[in-house]
């Protein structure tokens, strides 16, 4: 069965960077777009961008351009998102989600809580 | 960006009642391939969002038929008939027609 297993909680300092992961299993990793979504505390959901692991192509929400960098490792079926120049505004839960055959997010990771604090 | 206006922000209903949630988009969600990429998600407390409905009205496998989606162009509705305790959580609409993808602000469903 399809699973997206994300890395663990992160506590990071302001101005630093963090890289979180999303390990896919149960399907051909290179055949589906992987999307990333942010949920700030008490807030709704924001789309960050996608990566196509088959060729590494990416597309970002303009709001996250320069903040998020998406990569993928085909050998380990793992997608990554690096967040840079962190501020308290970046404290949030970050989800990865697979874009399925019906052009919507059919599987989600469990989410990674990132807390930015000195 | 396409703005998704979702109402109401919250609902409190008794078990067995029916509810409707509205989602209106600032642009038509009909894509160039003639499909409409409007989805409904449920985020149960402490969980990741889960897709319930895709392409306006198609139920995901395992989703009870108490859930139904309808609408077209810019105006969409999620209806839950005979609400059950397990239905509590926050419901979101999501459009996947235009980049960037955008979500509604959510409707919190509470059980009386």
Image (cartoon, rainbow, N blue to C red):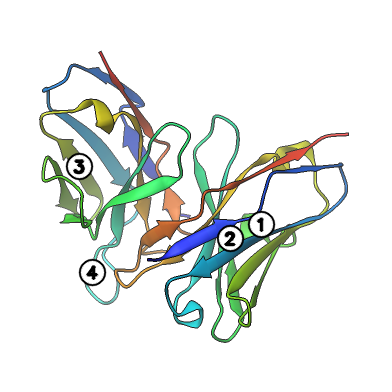
Q: Which residue is mark 2?
A: A61
Q: Is residue A61 left or right of residue A16?
A: left
Q: Is residue A53 left or right of residue A80?
A: left
What residue is shown at x 83% (from left), y 52% (from top)?
A85
Q: Which residue is mark 4?
A: B35
Whether label 4 touches label 1, CB < 8 Å: no
Q: Is residue B3 visible?
A: no
Q: Residues within 10 Å of mark 1 (few under 14, many from 20)?
A: few
Q: Which mark is residue A64?
A: 1
Give the CA distance from mark 3 to mark 4. 17 Å
Give the CA distance from mark 2 to mark 1. 5 Å
Give the CA distance from mark 1 to mark 3. 30 Å
Give the CA distance from mark 2 to mark 3. 26 Å
Pick whichever, A19 or A77, lies toward us. Answer: A77
What residue is shown at x 18% (from left), y 32% (from top)?
B20
What residue is shown at x 65% (from left), y 61% (from top)?
A21
Q: Which residue is mark 3?
A: B77
Q: Which mark is residue A26?
A: none
Q: Position of residue B22 (x, y in %)?
A: 25, 37
Q: Quadrant of residue A90?
A: top right
């Amino acid at each position: 069965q399809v699973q997206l297993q994300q890395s663990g909680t992160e506590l990071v300092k302001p101005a630093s960077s963090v890289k979180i992961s999303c390990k896919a299993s149960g399907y051909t990793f290179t055949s589906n777009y992987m999307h990333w979504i942010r949920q700030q505390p008490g807030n709704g959901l924001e789309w960050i961008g996608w990566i196509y692991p088959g060729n590494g192509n990416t597309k970002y929400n303009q709001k996250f351009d320069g903040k998020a960098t998406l990569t993928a490792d085909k050998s380990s079926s793992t997608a990554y998102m690096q967040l840079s120049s962190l501020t308290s505004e970046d404290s949030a839960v970050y989800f990865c989600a697979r874009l399925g055959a019906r052009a919507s997010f059919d599987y989600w990771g469990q989410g990674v809580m990132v807390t930015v604090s000195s | 960006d396409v703005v998704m206006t979702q109402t109401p922000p919250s609902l409190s209903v008794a078990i067995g009642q029916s509810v409707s949630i509205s989602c209106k988009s600032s642009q038509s969600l009909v894509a160039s391939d003639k499909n409409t990429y409007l989805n409904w998600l449920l985020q149960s407390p402490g969980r990741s969002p889960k897709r319930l409905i895709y392409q306006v009205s198609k139920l995901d496998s395992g989703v009870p038929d108490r859930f139904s989606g309808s609408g077209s162009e810019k105006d969409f509705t999620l209806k839950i008939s005979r609400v059950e305790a397990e239905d509590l959580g926050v419901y979101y609409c999501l459009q996947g027609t235009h980049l960037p993808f955008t979500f509604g602000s959510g409707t919190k469903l509470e059980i009386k």
